Structures are given as C-alpha cells and as structure tokens.
Image: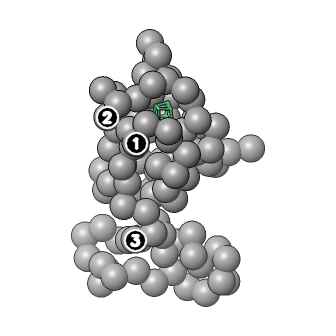
Amino acid sequence: MKLMTQYLKGVSTLSLSTENCVGCGECLTVCPRDVLTVSDGKAVIASLDSCIECGACVLNCPANAIQVNAGVGCASAVIASWFTGREPVCDCSGGECC
Ligand code: SF4
Ligand code: SF4
C-alpha cells in the first residue's frame, strides 16, 4: 500500500518535461507516493506535495523527462531517519520550510 500523506506544500523540486515524455508509465510504477499519473499519453504531476524527492522516477525514466533534487532537504532527512532510527537532521536550520 502506498502512503498518501502530504508533507510540506510547494517545496518539492520535482519537475516534468511533457515534451520529452514518451508515456511509458515507468515513473508511475516506481513512485512510492502516487505523485504521477499518465493522461493523454503523457506523464502529469498529480500530487506535487506528496513527492518525497526520492529520485526513483528520475532513475527509471528512459526519456530524461523528469528532474528532482534527490537526497537533499527535509524530506531526505525524514527518510534517512526511518532507516537510522535517529532524529531527522536537515540543513535548513528550522527556517520557514520546517
Ligand atoms: S521523486 Fe520519488 S516520490 Fe517524487 S515523484 Fe519521483 S518517485 Fe515519486
Ligand atoms: S518514465 Fe519518463 S517517459 Fe515514462 S511516463 Fe514517466 S516521465 Fe514519461
């Protein structure tokens, strides 16, 4: 079952080039958050604020149609804390994004 929680609004760096997209659906298959969908043969960002910037879609897109700054920021810190059992630590110093 995929998680549907939304975290910080409007901060994900995910972007999509519909011009490059070939509509294969690989990004939907690998996304753990159901962020993307395909409409009229092209991928569409359906829920940007659900993106945890894991980078799986970028790694699996055969058309280089997706960009995201994976492995940085608050989302990455939260994911790392799941695996280490430690408190999340990011570089934003508790500013507006936290
Ligand atoms: S970066 Fe991860 S969570 Fe975000 S759209 Fe891609 S696969 Fe989904
Ligand atoms: S993996 Fe890339 S080419 Fe395939 S549907 Fe997603 S964005 Fe489009």
Is 6 placed left or right of 26 in the picture?
left
Q: CA distance from mark 1 to mark 2?
A: 8 Å
Tell me the quadrant of the picture where the C terminus can be found: bottom left
Quarter of the image holding residue 68? bottom left
Residue designated by label 1: 64
Quarter of the image holding residue 25? top right
Residue designated by label 2: 17
Q: Which residue is drawn at the image coordinates 26% and 76% (left, top)? A: 95
Q: Look at discs 3 and 2 and give the one toward the viewer.
A: 2
> Would you say the residues marked 1 and 2 are in contact, meaning their CB atoms lie under 8 Å apart?
yes
Q: Is residue 71 above or below residue 38?
A: below
Residue designated by label 3: 72
Disc 3 marks a residue whose amino acid type is Val
The percent position of residue 51, horizontal first and vertical second, equals 46, 50
Q: Which residue is drawn at the image coordinates 64% and 74% (left, top)? A: 82
SS under mark 2 = loop
The residue lying furthest to the bottom in this view is 86
